[in-house]
Image (cartoon, coloured by chain):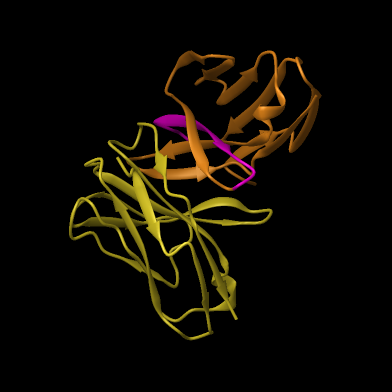
Chain colours: A yellow, B orange
Amino acid sequence: NAGVTQTPKFQVLKTGQSMTLQCAQDMNHEYMSWYRQDPGMGLRLIHYSVGAGITDQGEVPNGYNVSRSTTEDFPLRLLSAAPSQTSVYFCASSSQGDQPQHFGDGTRLSIL
Amino acid sequence: KNEVEQSPQNLTAQEGEFITINCSYSVGISALHWLQQHPGGGIVSLFMLSSGKKKHGRLIATINIQEKHSSLHITASHPRDSAVYICAVVRGLNDMRFGAGTRLTVKP
């Protein structure tokens, strides 16, 4: 099993560009989440989903968009990239919110 | 004030020592997670707790819901245990909030 797959692993963008970070899981998990990790800040929840068609905002949602059209995929869209969005992004999934989370390997994003 | 506080921030131990990392939280939760982040960046779930105590190998996690406190213990620590240990709480369905992490270094 691949588990949680994130692509790309690395990306450099210019301010104002848009892009989509991909996240796919093959465990039939209903719950999926996006986090960002910044030095000295720890992990912070951006958006989460509790099933196909259902998404909700986390702690730091501004500047990001998500949708969940299938159980497997949960893409994260940066609408107009800003230097403040330079971070490492992690996607995670679980069968329920109070079950162990499975993390992807992360996407390191730099915005110039 | 952060909703999830971990202590210590940094911890250096000699191989074989017993290690304790603490986590306190200030909100109502449905569950608490302990995560391990390797030096390469990957994150692994160690435990998910809603009450009591869990043990896996040399790792033990406890939670006291009334006191809003959890501890992660490592017995007979080893250099391969060197990592960042992160406490996270689940609010509601899937709203997770994280502590800043404890960086553990175990010296041979």
Quarter-of-image position of residue A47: bottom left
Where residue B100 appears, as percent x and y from the top left, is 64, 44
Q: Residue at x 35, y 43 (%)?
A: B94
Which quadrant would the C terminus of chain A be assigned to in this image?
Answer: bottom right
Comparing B45 with A99, the one in front is B45
Residue A78 in sight here: no
Q: In which quadrant is the N terminus of chain A drawn? A: top left
Spot occupied by residue A109 in the image (x, y as percentages of width and height): 53, 68
Q: Is residue A82 magenta?
A: no
Tell which of A27 and B80 is nearer to you: B80
User: Which residue is rendered at x = 39% and y = 40% of the image?
Assistant: A102
Q: Residue at the location (65% across, 28% down)? A: B81
Query: Which of the pair B12/A46 is nearer the observer?
Result: B12
Instruction: Check the image and report above or below for B80 versus B92.
Output: above
Left or right relative to B19: residue A101: left
Q: Is residue B29 magenta?
A: yes
Region of the chain picked out in magenta, as a range: B27-40
Q: In the picture provided, is A83 more to the left or to the right than A73? A: right
Residue A15 at x, y = what percent?
Answer: 53, 84
Q: Is residue B67 visible?
A: yes
